[in-house]
Amino acid sequence: MDRTSALKVIVDESLLARVPGYVLGLIAVPVVDVAAAAAEVDDLLTAAEDAVHGLSLGKAEVSALPPIAAWRDAYRSVDVNPNRFPCAAESVLRRVAKGDRLPRINALVNLCNAVSLDSRLPVASCDVGDITGELAVRLAHGGETYLPLGAPEAPEHPEPGEVVYADAQDRAHSRRWNWRQSEVIRTDVGRRRLLLTVEAVHEGGRADVERALDRLAAALDALGAVRQRPVVLDAAESGAELFVPGQDVPGQDVPGQDVPGQDVPGQDVPGQDVPEQSAAESAAESSVVAG
């Protein structure tokens, strides 16, 4: 798929009725060369781990952190036991709070883990090179197919009512909201088309999501990624069209991949012209160790 194919992301009304405070932040990354490591990202992750180590948090104290406590309540509201299936942010925080370091997977996964630890929010990198049309955060009907991360040969079906990220082909790309990612959207090294997600359910969560998105955007720019402006979905605005031609942040073109660009009113950075856009072929590990 070339990077000019749009993808609509929506949060289903039935989910918002159950969890009205849900906020989903998104950054579309049409092209990025994912490296095995990046020194500046490694430094961010190490600093985030050190900060958590310095707090000497126990398991109960991690669960009581306001963003995490709100996720535990949200999981219960959709009939998921957060003790058995903690949200992605709680999983990484628990692991680091014990004194451990997170595995270094690749530059994008490491970046998401660093921002997740600092923000206490689930932050994910999703390879959407194999997803077309629509990606919905919704309640499962139970017939979706989920390919487990690391074990795609053993497909599963989510339970009816379980929150999943699902595409137009009825494939589920997560289990129990953000507890686990699918093999299809794992982020690996090489040239990729990615969607970065940041989620919150606590009071004041939108501001925290926006801060996390700003950190991700700055890091993506430093890594030379082609990205679009962050988008935030919530009960007031529950859908957005991403990867639309002409919406790339100016100055982020990939050499040798140019196609005619398109200007989108209101999307230009003041004082800068939108250069010709580029196209790249995309291929299809969780952004957090547990999710």
Image (cartoon, grey):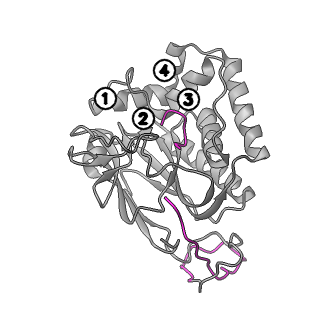
Question: Which sits earlier in the primary sequence, circle 3 or circle 2?
Answer: 3
Q: CA distance from mark 1 to mark 2?
A: 10 Å
Residue in front for this viewpoint, 192 or 262: 192
Residue bearing the label numbered 4: 63
Is 273 inside the magenta-drawn segment? yes
Q: Position of residue 93 (x, y in %)?
A: 57, 26
Q: Please name the residue that numbered disc 3 is placed on.
A: 92
Q: Which residue is mark 2?
A: 179
**Within 10 Å of the Cα at label 4, are there few (<14), some (14-19), or many (20+) other Cα atoms?**
many
- Name the residue: 78% across, 45% down: 40
Q: Is residue 266 above or below residue 200?
A: below
| Quarter of the rendering containing residue 100 | top right
Say which amino acid is labelled 3: Val
Between disc 4 and disc 1, the foreground one is 1
Query: How far separated are the C-alphas under marks 3 and 2?
Result: 11 Å
Magenta region, residue range: 262-291
Question: Can residue 223 be seen in this snapshot?
Answer: yes
Q: Residue at x 35, y 36 (%)?
A: 176
Type of amino acid at the residue the image marks with label 1: Val
The residue that disc 1 covers is 80
User: Which mark's residue is nearer the viewer, 4 or 2?
Assistant: 2
Label whose residue precedes the other's in the sequence (4 or 2): 4
Q: Residues within 10 Å of mark 3 (few under 14, many from 20)?
A: many
